[in-house]
């Protein structure tokens, strides 16, 4: 005689569901904010230097609009850079992450809040990215790729390099124990 499992599709009452606010998010290190603001200021300075060298070079004719509005362009770019730095200063503390036994979460957003969650069993692979400024501040970006996705599901920027290595190792080794256990 063959045992047949009966299909069940029980009704779930919303009052009995787990409380999602129990996720204890960890903040990113404070030097991540510094690195992002430094990167923004460096981009502004690099653009200013390139524009100034182009304006002062004797080899090519400079467009009259650049000559006429050079100072105004610099002031507008400086103002935009200050605005972007202020927004980053305010919003970056709202980027947080949480690693639990069976899933990984990343929260972001000040006005439009977003939480991305990924079950560990669905993680295809994990990558660490480190640009020059991240290396300067000993930070790393952890990219999580979901099974079936062409690009990364989400990334957690600004992790301590050691923390990112430990999370990556945990995700890769723990996934095997979940599948086999």
Image (tube, rainbow, N blue to C red):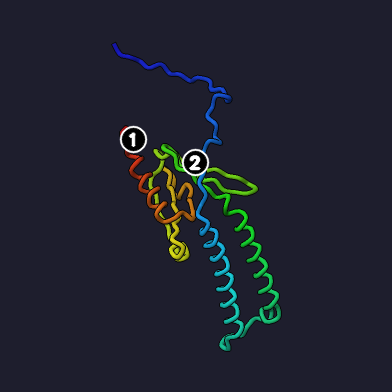
Position in image of residue 17 (x %, y %): 54, 27
Query: How many numbered circles does the render carry?
Result: 2
Q: Where is residue 88? Give x, y as percent.
A: 60, 58
Residue 65 is left or right of residue 168, and the answer is right
As drawn, which residue projects farthest toward the front? 30
Residue furthest to the bottom in view is 58
In the visual, does 31 lie left or right of 51? left
Please tell me whether mark 2 sits on a helix, a strand or a loop.
strand
Looking at the picture, does residue 163 appear above or below residue 67?
Answer: above
Which of 57 and 90 lies nearest the eye of the viewer?
A: 90
Specify few, some or many for label 1: CA neighbours under 10 Å numbering under 14, 14-19, or 20 or more: few
Quadrant in which the N terminus appears: top left
Residue at image point 67% right, 68% down: 79
Residue lying at 42% horizontally and 37% vertically, measured from the top left: 102
Q: Is residue 140 above or below residue 100?
A: below
Measure how far apart labels 1 and 2 are at the Cα level: 19 Å
Residue 126 versus residue 151: which sits nearer the camera?
Answer: 126
Residue labelled with disc 1: 179
Q: What percent of the width, then of the height, locates residue 168? A: 38, 49
Residue at x 60%, y 80% (from the top left corner): 52
Tag shown at residue 97: none
The picture quadrant where one finds residue 20 is top right
Which label number is shown at residue 117? Answer: 2
Identify the image quadrant of the C terminus: top left
- Graded by Cα atoms within 10 Å as few (under 14), some (14 to 19) or many (20 or more), the crowding at tag 2 reads some
Q: Earlier in the sequence, mark 1 or mark 2?
A: 2
Instruction: In the displayed orientation, state which residue is furthest to the left.
Output: 1
Q: Residue at x 51, y 38 (%)?
A: 23
Q: Residue 173's spot in the image, x, y percent?
A: 33, 43
**The residue tagged with tag 1: helix, strand or loop?**
helix
């Amino acid at each position: 005689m063959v045992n047949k499992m009966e299909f069940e599709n029980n009704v779930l009452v919303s009052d009995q569901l787990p409380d999602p606010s129990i996720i204890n998010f960890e903040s990113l290190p404070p030097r991540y904010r510094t690195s992002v603001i430094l990167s923004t200021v460096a981009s502004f300075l690099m653009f200013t230097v390139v524009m100034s060298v182009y304006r002062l070079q004797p080899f090519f004719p400079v467009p009259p609009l650049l000559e006429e509005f050079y100072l105004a362009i610099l002031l507008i770019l400086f103002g935009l850079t200050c605005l972007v730095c202020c927004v980053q200063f305010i919003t970056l503390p709202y980027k947080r992450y949480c690693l639990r036994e069976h899933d990984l979460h990343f929260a972001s957003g000040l006005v439009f809040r977003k939480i991305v969650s990924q079950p560990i069993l669905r993680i295809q692979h994990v990558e660490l990215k480190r640009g020059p400024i991240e290396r300067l501040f000993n930070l790393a970006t952890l990219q999580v790729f979901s099974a079936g996705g062409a690009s990364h599901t989400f990334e957690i920027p600004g992790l301590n390099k050691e923390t990112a290595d430990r999370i990556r190792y945990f995700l890769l080794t723990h996934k095997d124990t979940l599948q086999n256990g």
